[in-house]
Amino acid sequence: MSMTPFVHTKKEELREAMEREIGIIRTLLSSLHEEHNAILSKNELIIESVIDERVTIVGSFEHWSEKVVTLIHELAVNAKQIEPEEVQLRHSEAITLLQSCLDPDDFELHFLKDQVEALIREVYHQNDLNAQLILDKVDISESAYYKRQQINLKPKAKITVSVIER
């Protein structure tokens, strides 16, 4: 199927943005695993360090998420899947909408979409596990606990998948 230059350019930009986003989600997941190990070993210095680093990771994720959502929105408007006024898409809604904007032969974008969904599910799972460890099993200082909670309280863009809180 032949695509317009606009669609071709937007899909290429989307591929690049999704690849960046996936790299950041993997970094976030790695950070959550580091936090998990630090919680189990009750190493508060590592917990605090990992949480401090996560603020930067979440900021990068928000940036690339916003770009991905914008590109999906543009493709969806072009494909007449949504009206141009529908601009308040959440990341998860945009990723779901992407399916209807892709041609069957857009293999790489289908694969990247599936990767994003799987990685985000894993991030939620690991974050829930870490939170449960902190609440139930492990005695850590109040300062480490509150530092983690402060990340939860930072305002986030509406399009951002909430990786610290659900």
Image (cartoon, rainbow, N blue to C red):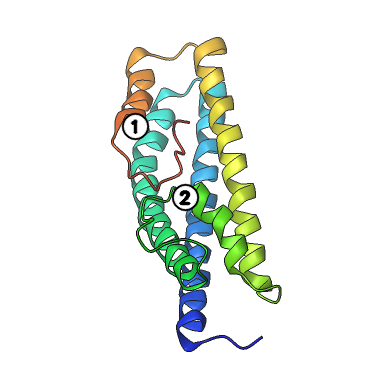
Q: In front: mark 1 or mark 2?
A: 2
Task: Answer few, some or many: residues within 10 Å of disc 2's Cα (few below 14, many 20 plus, some between 14 and 19).
Answer: many
Rendered location of residue 117, percent (x, y): 61, 50
Against 41, residue 137 (above or below) is above
Task: Answer few, some or many: residues within 10 Å of disc 1's Cα (few below 14, many 20 plus, some between 14 and 19).
Answer: some
Rendered location of residue 165, percent (x, y): 44, 31
Q: Does label 1 or label 2 sit earlier along the sequence?
A: 2
Rendered location of residue 114, percent (x, y): 65, 56
Under mark 1, the amino acid is Ile
Examine the image and state in which quarter residue 30 appears.
Answer: top right
Q: Between marks 1 and 2, how big is the CA–CA gap?
A: 19 Å
The residue labelled by disc 2 is 91
The residue sitting at 44% across, 63% down in the picture is: 73
Front in this rendered view, residue 54 or 158: 158
| SS label for mark 2 | helix
Q: Are marks 1 and 2 in contact (CB under 8 Å)?
A: no
The residue sitting at 45% across, 68% down in the picture is: 77
Examine the image and state in which quarter residue 41 appears.
Answer: top right
Answer left or right for 55 relative to 105: left
Mark linked to residue 79 = none
Mark linked to residue 151 = 1
| SS label for mark 1 | helix
Answer left or right for 107 relative to 130: right
Under mark 2, the amino acid is His
Against 131, residue 9 (above or below) is below
The residue sitting at 45% across, 83% down in the picture is: 6
The residue sitting at 46% across, 76% down in the picture is: 10
Against 30, residue 137 (above or below) is above
Q: In which quarter of the image is the N terminus?
A: bottom right
